Image: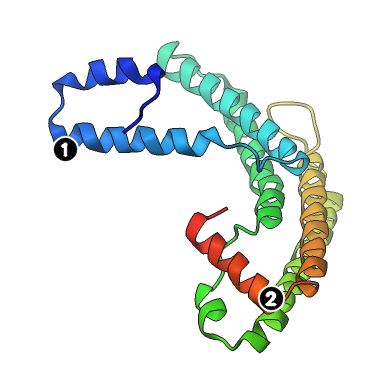
């Protein structure tokens, strides 16, 4: 249950609930407080993704307000929100690579012999580096072949793909850095790191 003073209104509001529903909502609020309290892991690499997310949130909120409150939706919000969502997916991918929070097969790090763990982890990092690098090249090729402009604003669509390519190359650089760090670690350190990721998710 949340114990901060700012939640007094929450308790007053919950007087009309039954006990099980009240406990469930309290657990959700407590989890949210636990999640948002610690921002020590936010790095410079994460700022672009946070900025894009803030812009996307503002655009979607504006779209919701104009459509359902004013009953006069702004036409450009849907298209621009779609482009921001694409950018968020790839720019946010840099953060996921940095934190190592992409999904992985946990059983390999639990049941494989320790002598294989370092080569496997290094190969995964190498594969990730190659994937992101190749994705960046494909994004540049797509940008060069795109000749049309956006419908809502007078900007070429290729701008979007160039942003995606930069994000992919940044992710490749981070994955390469992870590979170098992995090669310097012992198998025991790799196992502990993967177990920490599987239990905490960060």
Q: Earlier in the sequence, mark 1 or mark 2?
A: 1
Q: Quadrant of residue 31?
A: top left
Q: Nearer the viewer, residue 75 or 20?
A: 20
Residue lying at 69% horizontally and 39% vertically, measured from the top left: 49
Give percent across and percent down for residue 146: 80, 48
- Label drawn at residue 48: none
Q: Is residue 48 left or right of residue 82?
A: right
Instruction: Measure how far apart labels 1 and 2 are at the Cα level.
Output: 44 Å
Location of residue 38 with respect to 143 vertically, above or below:
above
Q: Residue furthest right?
A: 144
Q: Is residue 198 left or right of residue 43?
A: left
Disc 2: which residue? 121
Q: Nearer the viewer, residue 159 or 152?
A: 159
- Count neighbours of disc 2 (C-alpha within 10 A) and say few if under 14, some if 14 to 19, many if 20 or more: many
Count the labels in the image: 2
- Quadrant where the N terminus sits is top left
Residue lying at 66% horizontally and 54% vertically, measured from the top left: 99
Q: Nearer the viewer, residue 25 or 8?
A: 8
Location of residue 110 with respect to 96 vertically, above or below:
below
- Label drawn at residue 20: 1
Mark 2 lies on a secondary structure that is helix
Residue lying at 48% horizontally and 14% vertically, measured from the top left: 72
Q: Residue furthest top?
A: 70
């Amino acid at each position: 249950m949340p114990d901060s003073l700012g939640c007094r209104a929450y308790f007053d509001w919950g007087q009309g609930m039954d006990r099980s529903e009240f406990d469930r909502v309290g657990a959700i609020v407590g989890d949210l407080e636990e999640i948002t309290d610690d921002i020590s892991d936010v790095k410079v690499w994460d700022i672009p993704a946070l900025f894009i997310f803030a812009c996307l949130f503002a655009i979607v909120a504006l779209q919701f307000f104009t459509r359902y409150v004013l009953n006069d939706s702004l036409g450009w919000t849907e298209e621009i929100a779609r482009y921001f969502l694409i950018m968020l997916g790839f720019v946010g991918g840099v953060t996921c690579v940095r934190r190592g929070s992409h999904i992985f097969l946990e059983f390999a790090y639990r049941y494989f012999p320790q002598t294989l763990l370092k080569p496997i982890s290094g190969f995964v990092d190498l594969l990730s580096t190659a994937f992101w690098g190749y994705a960046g090249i494909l994004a540049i090729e797509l940008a060069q072949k795109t000749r049309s402009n956006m419908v809502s604003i007078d900007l070429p669509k290729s701008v979007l793909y160039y942003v995606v390519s930069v994000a992919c190359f940044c992710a490749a650089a981070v994955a390469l850095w992870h590979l170098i760090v992995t090669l310097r670690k012992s198998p025991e350190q790799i196992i502990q790191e993967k177990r920490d990721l599987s239990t905490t998710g960060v």
